[in-house]
Amino acid sequence: MNISISYNEIHEYVARNYGKDVTVSFVDEKTVKITYRQKVLITSIPLSLNLKVMGITDASVTLQYNGGGGIDMIIAGVLQLMQEKLLEMFNAAEAVSVEKDHRIRIDFRKIEKAKTAFDKIALRDIKFSESGAEVEIALL
């Protein structure tokens, strides 16, 4: 079974729910470029990073990010905040682990609200195209 989402849908969701101007664009089948426009005084500065799918198990995904020194420091701060929010919202801070070489592992079975779903499905693949992302899952 395949689930597809367009980059435009992601952009609109983030803008509507978080008020941020985030753009996702295709790099290759396993990599997308994420650009965020940060307002500074009277202008805005684009901050970009590449996000690559490095590995998939039935209930986890390992991603690698690369944005350069300054961006990598910002990402480290965002990851710390994400872990705090997961703990606060789902008691699941351990669901996101930061690994060496700018890798992030997300284990969906450690998120209570996702665990039930991942008892019935298994991740098989995540691919990117010019228009969006496609997640392949199998029913168990």
Image (spheres, rainbow, N blue to C red):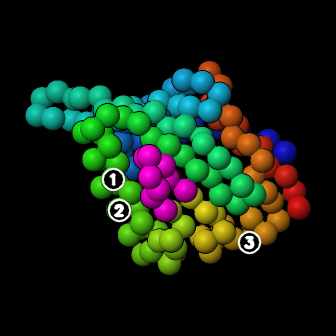
**Badge 3 is on which residue?**
116
How far, Cα to Cα, is label 1 from label 3?
29 Å
Q: Is residue 104 magenta?
A: yes
- Relative to the observer, which residue lies in front, 23 or 82? 82
- Residue type, numbered disc 2: Gln
Residue 55 location, x and y as percent? 65, 46
**Magenta highlight on residue 22:** no
Closer to the chain start, of discs 1 and 3, is 1
In-image side of 75 versus 24 (left or right):
left
- Identify the secondary structure beneath mark 3: helix
The front one of 28 and 39 is 28
Query: Is residue 17 shown to the viewer in this render?
Result: no
Task: Tell me which residue sits at (75%, 57%) in the image.
Answer: 58
Magenta-drawn segment: 97-105
Q: Which residue is denoted by mark 1 in the rendering?
A: 76
Identity of the amino acid at label 3? Thr
State yes or no: discs 2 and 1 in contact (Cβ < 8 Å).
yes
Residue type, mark 1 in image: Ala
Horizontal relation, residue 80 to residue 23: left or right: left
Q: What residue would you read off at disc 2?
A: 80
What whole-number distance in Å separates the C-alpha atoms at marks 2 and 1?
6 Å
Residue 114 is drawn in which quadrant?
bottom right
Residue 16 in percent (x, y) is at: 44, 45
**In the rendered view, would you say 21 is above or below 80?**
above
Foreground label between 1 and 3: 1
Magenta part, dominant SS: strand
